[in-house]
Amino acid sequence: MSDAPVTVKVDITLGLRGMLGGPVPVPAELSYDPTDPYAVTATFHHGLGEVTWIFARDLLADGLIAPAGDGDLHLNPVFDADLVLFVLNSPDGAAVMEAPAEELAEFLDLTYEQVAPGSEWDQVDFEGELAKMAARR
């Protein structure tokens, strides 16, 4: 039996906030691959396909307790509702989605079981990454 880290995948439903009413459910998948230990991937599914957003695992951890983010993704906890707002901005538009804070925390805990916070660098094959960059030259 191997103790090698495994990819964590969790299905979650976020609520897309709009100007015309309550949140519209958006099915999504959060995933964490220990071979890319600093990143979390969120794939949002909608009628026309899917949108994938990659962001720092630390951003998710920070966004559970205080406003966090810079650039195209900001996370804002809503403590009285036990939610976290995902504020996404791209050249194609913007969206605000809400997610249950407890489900995000549970996902984060699962990622920590695979790669403990602060030990991400141990998962990076630095020599292999350098070799890939040298091969592209």
Image (cartoon, helix red, strand yellow):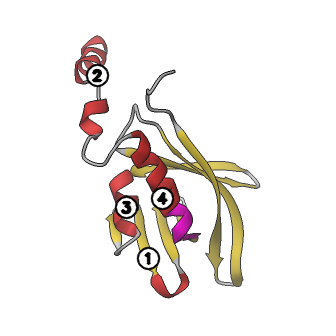
Q: Position of residue 134 (x, y in %)?
A: 24, 14
Residues at circles 1 and 3 in contact by the CB criterion of under 8 Å: no
**Label 2, on which residue?**
129
**Label 4, on which residue?**
91
User: What span is in magenta?
Assistant: 99-104
Q: Nearer the viewer, residue 121 or 128?
A: 121
**Label 1, on which residue?**
77
For the C terminus, the image quarter is top left
> Could you tell me the amino acid type at mark 4?
Pro
- Under circle 3, the secondary element is helix
Report, in whole angstroms, how far the alpha carbon at label 4 lies from the one at label 2: 30 Å
- Under circle 1, the secondary element is strand
Q: Nearer the viewer, residue 116 or 41?
A: 116
For marks 1 and 3, the one nearer the N-term is 3
**Mark 3, other Cα within 10 Å: few <14 / some 14–19 / many ≥20:** some
Q: Position of residue 106 (x, y in %)?
A: 51, 59
- Under circle 4, the secondary element is loop
Farthest residue, direction bottom: 80
Query: Residue at point 51% right, 36% down?
Result: 7
Query: Residue at point 23% right, 24% down?
Result: 126
**Label 3, on which residue?**
61
Task: Answer with the quarter of the image where residue 98 lies.
Answer: bottom right
